[in-house]
Structure formats: structure tokens, C-alpha cells
Amino acid sequence: MQIDLSTGTLDYVDTGGDGPTVVLLHGLLMDSSLWDGPIADLAADHRCVAPTLPLGAHRLPVSGDLSLPAIARLVEEFLERLDLHDVTLVGNDTGGALVQLVLAGKPERVGRAALVSCEAFDNVPPGLTGKVLVLSGKLSPRLFGAFMQQLRLRAVRRLPIAFGWLTKRGDAATARWIRPVLTSQEIRRDTVRMLRAIDGRAVAEATAALSSFHRPALVVWAAEDRVMPPEHGRRLTDLLPDSRLVEIADSYTLVPLDQPTELAAAVRSFVMTTVI
């Protein structure tokens, strides 16, 4: 499916249905397919909606501001255009930072929030992976494309500076995600603009504001995470007034790829046992 928003056209997945609505946000150099595994499970009794945001794996070029706060506003616009209410807003990796920015901005359409191994506090850009990616954004779009060509090789994708510390089992997905920046000059330009606009201060401020979010919250963290410190999961749980923490074993940051069934079970339990 596609929707026309102020910055351009976005692709998105919408399973439909009458169940509670779950909106799922991905991270840098990813698309909505991050959530394919959990959606296959949750769609039995939930409406699952997953946009592909302009974070580097999108296929349709966009215009305007591509800072994280601006992309959070795009998420808000997306919810408004689809007329979604009382959603469970879920974010993994940088998608979790976007959830925090939405909660600090216009949370009126959010009934519940779930943060899954994500950027928070001062961890922006996150770990070695994020720092290398943001540094590569200082290159021109042409040189950035040449740099990214190395990721055609699985051995390079599996390095800690690439996707190696983000997922144990998701190499096929990461190979798909890099295709737009390898094949489209316009997407390379978008991605460089987005990477150059990353500023951790906005995320840190949004994280600090979570103490004002009094609706139900779920924090899910990969116990073996090497990019998003597990301590941050516990700190977020303490910061959110109405929250619970679930730790998932045998997974790196991208829990939707490494442990989709366990993540879907955690989200389903959260939705079904909380009242908004």
C-alpha cells in the first residue's frame, strides 16, 4: 500500500482487521519487512500497520527535513491520515527513538507504547554500528554509495561495523535493505541528508520526557544486545510510570528478526492485559 504525505509517498503494510491496532516502526537502513515475522503472528487478532520510513531503505525519494524529529512528525501525520486511534506504537532500533519523539510531541493517538532494544539517553548514534554509519554520511552521495557497495558481501555485512552486532539470523533481510542505496542516486541523497541530520540531543530530551507518559508501556530488550545497552532497558522501565520489562534471550538488537515469535507473544500479552 502507499500513502501520500507532506514529504512524499510512503509504502506501508496494513493487515486490516477489527483487532487492536499495532503500529510498528523500524530503524536506520531498514524497511517495514523488519516486522514480517511478528506481523505473521499478530495479524491473527490485531491490525498491524508498518510504514517504510525514509531512513535509507525506502524506495521512493522524499523531500524536506529528514531529521529524526521531522520523521517523528511524519509518523504523527501518518497516524492522522489513516485516522488511527489508541494505537500500540512499537519501535525497534531507531524506530524506538521515533516512538519516544512521538510521545514527547503529539501522543494523542497513542494508547500504549512499546520500546524494543532501541536508542535512548545518550546512545545516539548507537554503538560502533551507528557511529560508523553516521560517519559515512559525511561523504558525498556518490562516495557514500561507493562505501556502501562493500555491503554486497555477506562477510562485510556480518562485521560489527555493519549488521553483525544487530542481528544473529537476519542476513537475508539486511541484504534486501541495502539495495535502494546501491541502486538509486535519489535514495543515496536522501540517506546522506538523513544521516547528516542525526542529533542525539533531541532523542535524549524525548527520553527524559518519558516520565510524563502515563499510559501503559512495554520495554523489550535483547539480553545479548551489544549495541543498545541492556542497562538502558532497565532505566527506561524505571522512567516510565506504567511499564513492564521483558528480556529476550538469544537475540541481538533486531529482536523482530532474531526472535519474532517471542516478541509477538510479549506484544500480544501486553495489549491483552492492559486497559487504555
Image (cartoon, rainbow, N blue to C red):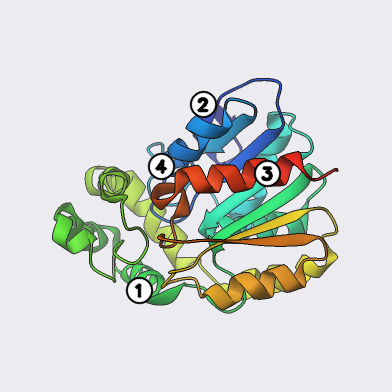
Q: Earlier in the sequence, mark 1 or mark 4?
A: 4
Give the secondary structure at mark 4. Answer: loop
Q: Is residue 237 left or right of residue 11?
A: right
**Residue 129, relative to residue 35: is it above or below?**
below
Residue at 47 percent across and 41 percent down: it is 35
**Residue 18, relative to residue 6: is it above or below?**
above
Image position, residue 264 (x, y; %)? 55, 42
Cα separation between marks 1 and 4: 20 Å
Q: Which residue is mark 3?
A: 269
Cα separation between marks 2 and 3: 30 Å
Image position, residue 270 (x, y; %)? 70, 47
> Can you see residue 205?
yes
Q: Residue 86, located in which quarter of the rendered image? A: top right
Give the secondary structure at mark 3. Answer: helix
Cα separation between marks 3 and 1: 39 Å
**Residue 109, relative to residue 204: is it above or below?**
above
- Sort mark 1 into few (<14), some (14-19) or many (20+) by Cα contacts within 10 Å: few
In the image, what residue type sits under mark 4? His
Q: Which residue is mark 2?
A: 2
**Residue 238, relative to residue 84: is it above or below?**
below
Cα separation between marks 2 and 1: 32 Å
Q: Which residue is mark 1?
A: 135
Give the secondary structure at mark 2. Answer: strand
In the image, what residue type sits under mark 2? Gln
Q: Which residue is mark 4?
A: 58
